[in-house]
Amino acid sequence: MQRDDVMADPQALAEALATTGYLTDEGLATVTWLSHALQRPLLLEGEPGTGKTALAEALAELRGIPLVRLQCYEGIEASQALYDWDFPRQILHLRVVEAAATAGPDREVADVAALEHELFDERFLLARPVLRALQEAPCVLLVDEIDRADDEFEAFLLEVLSSWSVSIPELGTIRATEPPLVVLTSNRTRELHDALKRRCLYHWIEHPGLDRELAIVRTRLPEVDERLAAEVVGVVQRLRAEADLVKPPGVAETLDWARALHALGASTLDPQVAAATMGAAIKYREDAERVRASLDRMLA
């Protein structure tokens, strides 16, 4: 399938994503296609490990365009997402200009305005992820874990997504020649503002059902024994449904567990080997205790 054809319709997109190892359902394929067709950001919420970040990576791989990632965290500021000035290079340039101006009696010191213009030239600009995405489009801009940022940063991001441009006082306005495909992810540690949600297309990603999760494991880890893959997926599905865990394992943990068992040469999942490798899928002590108490029953 040609790159121009992968976004022809939701079904074509789903089939193309499958070639990268990302298996999606109809709902997610449709909203992702609409995000591209309508040039609207896509906001994905769901439990950790359900494939939110992986979708952005798969889209970039599929279309053969750069993936620009902005990892959000508490206290992140607009300058860390947008741009900064390369102060060491500016100082070095200033010293060179001063040295040239005093090299001979016929040289004059550059006037302040001209020197300031030189110092705030684009060559001294350090583009951070948001500015890079506007400059490098077409690309995929992944704003990961937006729920970890604060309200002020969310407002800044909304302004950029509304105009696909940023203003730099020393240089003017930089506008994207083509809007990037924007994917925002949230683990819902806090509620996002309605204004940002209105700007985006929204989709909640559930953990996959048994058949699709098994297909994901077989696609991503074809070297794993089919029986072992089926047993791992079956146990993970039951853990999510029955174990009342603090942090149910996501698809990423399912893949890690299957990969770990394969590395040990296991061809089946018995209670002893399951308990020994549980750390690949279970990340809390309380959860590990609950799972160990029910392994025999789940593997019977």
Image (tube, rainbow, N blue to C red):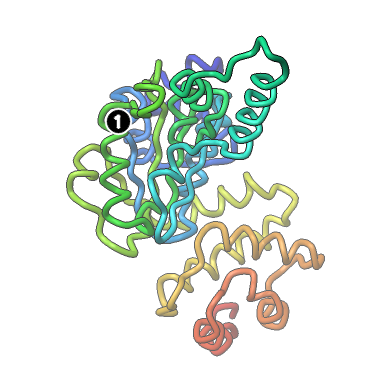
90 or 129: which is nearer to us?
Answer: 90
Point out residue 230 in the picture as x, y percentages from the top left corner.
Answer: 60, 60
Relative vertical location of residue 63 with respect to residue 51 in this rendering, above or below: above
Point out residue 228 in the picture as x, y percentages from the top left corner.
Answer: 68, 63
Q: Quadrant of the C terminus?
A: bottom right
Q: Amino acid at mark 1?
A: Arg
Point out residue 208 in the picture as x, y percentages from the top left corner.
Answer: 44, 54
Q: Quadrant of the N terminus?
A: top right
169 or 131: which is nearer to us?
Answer: 169
**94 left or right of 104 in image:** left
Q: Secondary structure at mark 1?
A: loop
Corner quadrant of residue 13: top left
175 or 195: which is nearer to us?
Answer: 175
**150 left or right of 221 in image:** left
Point out residue 32 in the picture as x, y percentages from the top left corner.
Answer: 37, 34
Query: Which residue matches tag 1?
Result: 40
Relative vertical location of residue 222 with respect to residue 150 in this rendering, above or below: above
Q: Residue at x 53, y 27 (%)?
A: 119
